[in-house]
Image: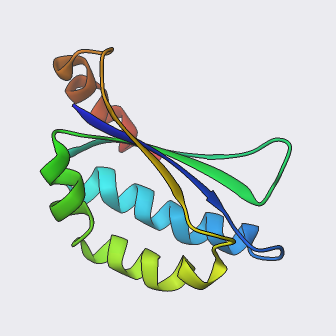
Amino acid sequence: MYAIFVTIKVKPGFAEQFKAASLGDAQGSVRDEPGCVRFDMHQSTTDPHTFHLYEVYENQDAHMNAHRNAPHYQQWRATVQDWFDGEPQRVAMTSVFPSDAGWRAQKPGLLNW
C-alpha cells in the first residue's frame, strides 16, 4: 500500500472551517474512492492550527490520479487553499503493517460515521 502523512498549518481563525471542509474530503475519499483504504484527520494538541492527515491508498496512482481528480478533493482544495499558513508538508511511505489484506478488511468500518 502507498501511504502519505500530510501536515497542514492553517491561518488563525480558520481551524474550525478547515475541520468542516476536511471532514467532507475524508469521508468522500473512503466512501467514493475504491483505491482509498484509510483517511485519518488529526488536530494537534499543542497548536490548534496544525492538522495531520494520514491517508492509505492501494497504490500511488490511486492517490495521485483518482484522489486528486475526485470532485470532493477538488472542492476541498478550492475551499481551503487560501487558509494554508505555508505549504503543506508531505511524507510518502510504503505501508509495512497492516498487510494489504488487513487494510482492505478495515475499510468497511470506516464508513460507519
Whether residue 34 appears in this view of the structure is no
Residue at 13% from the left image edge and 52% from the top image edge: 61
What residue is shown at x 83% (from left), y 51% (from top)?
47
Please, is residue 93 above or below residue 51 in the view?
above
Q: Position of residue 60 (x, y in %)?
A: 18, 46
Please report the residue visible at 81 percent of the width from the left and 55 percent of the height from the top. Answer: 48
62 left or right, relative to 39: left
Looking at the image, residue 66 sits to the left or right of residue 13; the answer is left
17 or 60, nearer to the observer: 60
The answer to whether one can see residue 48 in this image is yes
Q: Tell me where residue 65 appears, x and y as whole percent.
A: 16, 63
Q: Quadrant of residue 82?
A: bottom right
Image-based side of 110 in relation to 113, left or right:
left
**Residue 104 rendering spot, x and y as whole percentages:** 21, 28
Front-most of residues 50 and 26: 50
Q: Is residue 107 above or below residue 11?
A: above
